Image (cartoon, rainbow, N blue to C red):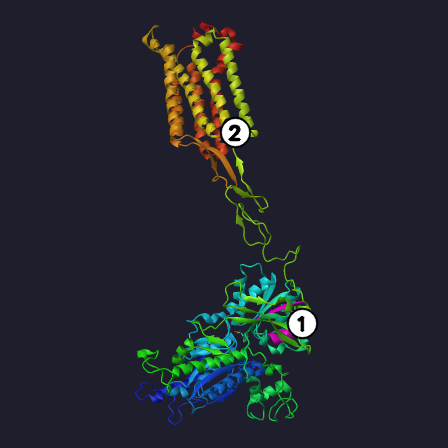
Amino acid sequence: MTLLTLFPLLYCVFVLTITYNPVTSFTSPTPSPAKVCTLQNSFQPAFVARGDYVIGGIFPLHYNQEMPDLNCTYRPPPVNCNGFDPRAFRWVQTMRLAVEEINQSTELLPNYTLGYKIFDSCAYPLTGQRAAMAVLNGLNEDDTPLCSGASPLLAVIGESGSAQSIVVSRILQPFRIPMISYFSSCACFSDRRKYPTFFRVIPNDDYQVTAIAQLLVRFNWTWVGLVRGDHEYGRFAVQGLLRELQDTKVCVAYQEMIPLLYNRQRALEIIEVMRSSLAKVVVVFSAEGEMTPFLRDYMIQNITGIQWVASEAWVTASVFTGSEYYPYMGGTIGFGIRKGHISRLSDYLQTVNPQMYPNNLLVKELWEALYGCKPSLSSSTQLPLCTGQESLLEQHSAYMNTSSPRVAYNVYKAVYAIAHSLHNLLLCQPGSGPFQNNSCAQSNNIHPWQLQYYLQEVTFNIAGEEVNFDLKGDSIPYYDIINWQRGTGGNIEFVNVGLFDGTKPAGEELVIQEDRIIWAGHQSEVPVSAVRRGEPVCCFDCVPCDSGKISNQTNSIECTFCPEDFWSNKDRTACIPKEVEFLAYDSLGIALTVISVVGACLTMAVFAVFFHHRNTAIVRVNNSELSFFILFALTLCFLCSLMFIGEPTPWSCMLRHTAFSITFSLCISCILGKTLVVLAAFTATRPGDNIMKWLGPKQQRFIIFSCTLVQVVICAAWLIDAPPFPSRNTQYERSKIILECSVGSSLAFWCVLGYIGLQACLSFVLAFLARKLPGNFNEAKFITFSMLIFSAVWLAFIPAYISSPGNYADAVESFAILASSFGLLFCLFAPKCYIILLKPEKNTKQHLMGK
Ligand code: TRP
């Protein structure tokens, strides 16, 4: 679209270029030698003045433009703008005043004059674009400046709204013409790659949104609404504000956008949202253009109690100072652009009147807007004719408000910035200039990019205020805090109640005189805009902290970790010491204890039975001494399991595995001895054979002793080198500390178990070999069986042990000990006890030896 619109106007430039260049190989599309350059469309400037150097000005002299005529059967009529804006007219006059001052000055640009061309943008990007084209072009066919040498247009002052400035900047960019905006604050301009020739004398909105966020936090307004206009300014500002609010307790209840083409239906919907929301504070990023109709509809709805937070674009707009606004808009607070003082402004503004500018349409419109009369018969409006006695007074504040110029002061600064840069440029000493080969710009042929260099560098003082541009073209961030209070006439006055200075260190920027503020509804108390207790609307869904983290206040946005050894309670509000777990005397512990005590008692009972019947055949045949050994060892085994219950201490940890492994070793050694004896006795063919000699009681004791000794040695080595120790396991379950015995050396642990396993296998093999030997009471059968059970228990133990957590591993081990001990006890001794106690008649040597 941009290119298409560019075409008709550039066409003139294009045609001229070829005509001036005789060696061109192009053929002109419509060569007409007499008059080559024709303006395709004309656009009348608001004000022009000739000068050695010309600066452009683009101002939104109207609020609005009418829908363009889309019928293409005739030449399109000029765009119709409506809604004359006296405020922008004042800015135009300020620019003219500044130029005049500079031209009269003997210090600034003494031998040169500045000229200007000022156009109306109708506060609309497309018209702004046309204004930018018109600024570039000559005013008529004879005045085609771009065609001869450097452009006499050096810089442009404009535009007001960011949306228009974006378009203007894009058009000026290819020509490298710098522009200084007096009101475009959008943060988007900070991208130097997109807007290389853009400068501004208004702070970047990044500062404004920080300031507004600080204001909301300061007054504890945690539930607010956002309304914006449909333009870059609104879009970027809301984006920035949301970013600033992210880490604060302020929540946004709703975000609404007033459409670009004002639509009453939509506006009423927005107003309904505002009415029904609990958010009583509404932040608005828009300008008079859309605020005027919006506020009209808002006031018809008769809503009160809204505290407005205004952006810099409308917080000082004089259109809203009428007394009818006070009930609805009084108390509005916002950040206004820094004000300044222009001493001659008031006088200068009064020089404008229809007599002095009989042909200027804008002056006519000003008169119509201020006095409601038409200054001459020629205008088509229905208004009565003016008397000619009208004079400009302070009360025509829309135009005459000169007590605290803000945007006008920006315009003033912008003109001076250009003048100072130009002045510095002309002061350049040949041979020590900033350009290639230390050259200077030629005063009769200054290129706009050369001026841009000086603009970037310029610093000057204006009424004590320093003006300069940073590398992004931005200026010093400073705002006044403005509060809308009732003036003497019932109308609204803008009262200064504080300031925001972005150059101060973080946290000190905002200074508010709270006692001077009058809030919405003529209140002196800060209005509340927070989510109320007991009401469900909340911008957060509160969720409890993760386990292990706590937060001790509701609505907080962060959870904190509990220190080590501490864990969150159920409500996640406090850290409590972690639960310490071990196999205690709870139900499991007690069960295990009972079982082991019962086992030990049973073994002792068997011991007693055997001892009592020690002279009967069955006891004697079966190697009574070894049986007593086994029973003794089994008792110890049962008792061993008790060591796994209770809080682990260094001693209990060391004892646990060693005691258990040694008693088990002893027990199985005895069984091994027994098997050997059985095997030897039956394989010996003749009585008194050698083998039996080798397996006498002494040798048996020796075998048992040495087999056990191996285990003792392993255990001793283990205890000396890396003894088991109590440890706190926090890995397995993060909410608990599991007290367990760390084995110290797992090699030793598995060696000890492995050795028991080895012994068990050996006895199993031997007993298996002996199982078929004759005799009614061949013990080998029972030993085989007991070893099978034993192995089964311990094989099952390994996976169970490895996969059980902390205290359960102890329970598993203890259980395995008990199970295998019972296995041994029953398999080895139950049949014998049965015979001894219930079948004493079978307890004879004959019976036992078979036939
Ligand atoms: N700071 C605003 C901007 O950058 C000021 C403004 C002027 C504005 N005219 C506007 C905002 C029109 C929205 C619409 O745009």
Can you say whether 452 is above or below 101 in the image?
above
- Residue at point 65% right, 58% down? 532
- Residue at point 53% right, 40% down? 578
Q: Nearer the viewer, residue 705 or 114?
A: 114
Label ID, residue 328? 1
Q: Position of residue 846 (x, y in %)?
A: 45, 5
Number of numbered discs visible in the structure rendering: 2
Q: Quadrant of ligand 1?
A: bottom right
Task: Identify residue type, mark 1.
Answer: Tyr
Q: Quadrant of residue 211?
A: bottom right
Q: Nearer the viewer, residue 293 or 367?
A: 367
- State left or right for residue 278 relative to residue 647: right
Pointer 1: residues within 10 angstroms few (<14), some, or many (20+)?
many
Label ID, residue 589? none
Badge 1 marks a residue whose secondary structure is helix
Can you say whether 175 is above or below 752 in the image?
below
Residue at the spot of label 2: 646
Q: In whole angstroms, how far apart are the C-alphas of marks 2 and 1?
A: 76 Å
Q: Confirm whether the magenta stretch covers residue 197.
A: no
- State left or right for residue 658 relative to residue 256: left
